[in-house]
């Protein structure tokens, strides 16, 4: 009974996150993952994701992510992946007026190491990940600040390197419920880019089917970050075969 109370309290806390600071945004993230175990050490997965913003009124992006993971030792895994991101971009001028809105793609590559250990029913893991994202050149219609006329603007292609560090604690409450909490930093060439904190629970329905429910707070630390601070409710489903 106590375990059910803890889980219900966790879900109730996540449900209240729409009460937020005026300058922050709220969105929802949905993802579906297919996970294939190739052998005892090697696995591959495909994840499709949709993200919203502007208090869940507008699509932020669609993405597809293909990854592989190899177990070097019982406590150490190496991973690599590629993601295609299709973003809903907005550009604003110094008067906070929207001057351009367009869809554009990004290509993302990553490689990382994850170390983990178990202390009773508590699992502790540390993931170190390098991430490179390339945004191709894009020419779009943009409103001129001077007279409001529409002209073409070309945004040059650019790449960005990020080093991600995530520490996570996960507790085996029952065979079905596995609540967790994690914190992650994103560090770029100019220093700390953003911080992301999450609390949620994995719900293992069977060996093949599992769900994930979480609350995420993302804090922008770089003045050039276009996302700003965000509160997110996330839902995920994983099928293993």
Image (cartoon, rainbow, N blue to C red):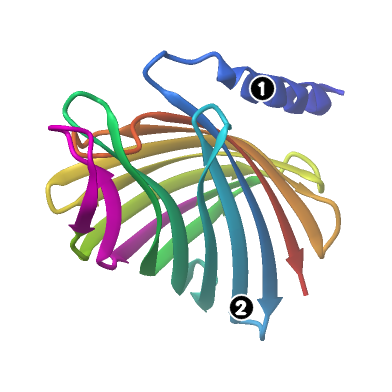
Residue 9, position in %: x, y?
71, 20
Q: Quadrant of the N terminus?
A: top right
Residue 4, position in %: x, y?
82, 27
Residue 130, position in %: x, y?
31, 64
Q: What residue span does the magenta drawing correspond to?
A: 125-154
> Dot 2, how many residues are within 10 Å of its Cα: few (below 14), some (14-19), or many (20+)?
some
Residue at which label 2 appears: 43
Of residues 135 and 65, which is closer to you in this image? 135
Depicted 126 relative to depicted 84: above or below: above
* Drawn side of residue 191 relative to residue 162, left or right: left
- Residue at the location (58% across, 32% down)? 56
Q: CA distance from mark 1 to mark 2?
A: 34 Å
Residue 134, position in %: x, y?
29, 66
* Drawn side of residue 241 relative to residue 20, left or right: right
> Dot 1, how many residues are within 10 Å of its Cα: few (below 14), some (14-19), or many (20+)?
few
- Residue at the location (19% across, 23% down)? 95
Secondary structure at numbered mark 1: helix
Residue at which label 1 appears: 15
Depicted 76 relative to depicted 140: above or below: below
Any mark on residue 105, and which? Answer: none
Dot 1 or dot 2: first in sequence order is: 1
Secondary structure at numbered mark 2: strand
- Residue at the location (20% across, 59% down)? 154
Q: Can you name the residue that lies furthest to the bottom here?
A: 39
- Residue at the location (67% across, 63% down)? 33
């Amino acid at each position: 009974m106590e375990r059910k109370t803890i889980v219900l309290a966790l879900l109730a806390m996540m449900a209240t996150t729409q009460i937020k600071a005026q300058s922050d945004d709220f969105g929802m993230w949905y993802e579906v993952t297919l996970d294939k175990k190739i052998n005892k050490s090697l696995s591959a997965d495909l994840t499709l994701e949709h993200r919203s913003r502007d208090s869940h009124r507008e699509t932020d992006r669609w993405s597809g992510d293909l990854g592989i993971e190899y177990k070097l030792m019982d406590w150490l895994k190496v991973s690599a992946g590629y993601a295609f991101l299709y973003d809903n971009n907005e550009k604003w001028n110094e008067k906070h007026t929207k001057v351009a809105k367009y869809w554009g793609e990004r290509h993302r590559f990553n490689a990382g190491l994850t170390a983990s250990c178990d202390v009773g029913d508590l699992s502790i893991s540390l993931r170190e990940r390098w991430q490179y994202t390339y945004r191709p050149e894009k020419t779009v219609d943009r409103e001129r600040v001077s007279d409001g006329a529409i002209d073409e603007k070309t945004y040059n292609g650019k790449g960005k390197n990020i080093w991600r560090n995530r520490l996570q604690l996960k507790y085996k409450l029952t065979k079905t419920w596995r609540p967790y909490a994690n914190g992650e930093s994103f560090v770029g060439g100019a220093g700390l880019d953003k911080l992301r904190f999450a609390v949620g629970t994995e719900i293992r329905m069977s060996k093949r089917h599992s769900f994930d429910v979480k609350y995420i707070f993302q804090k922008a630390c770089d003045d050039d970050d276009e996302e700003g601070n965000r509160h997110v409710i996330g839902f995920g489903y994983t099928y293993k075969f």
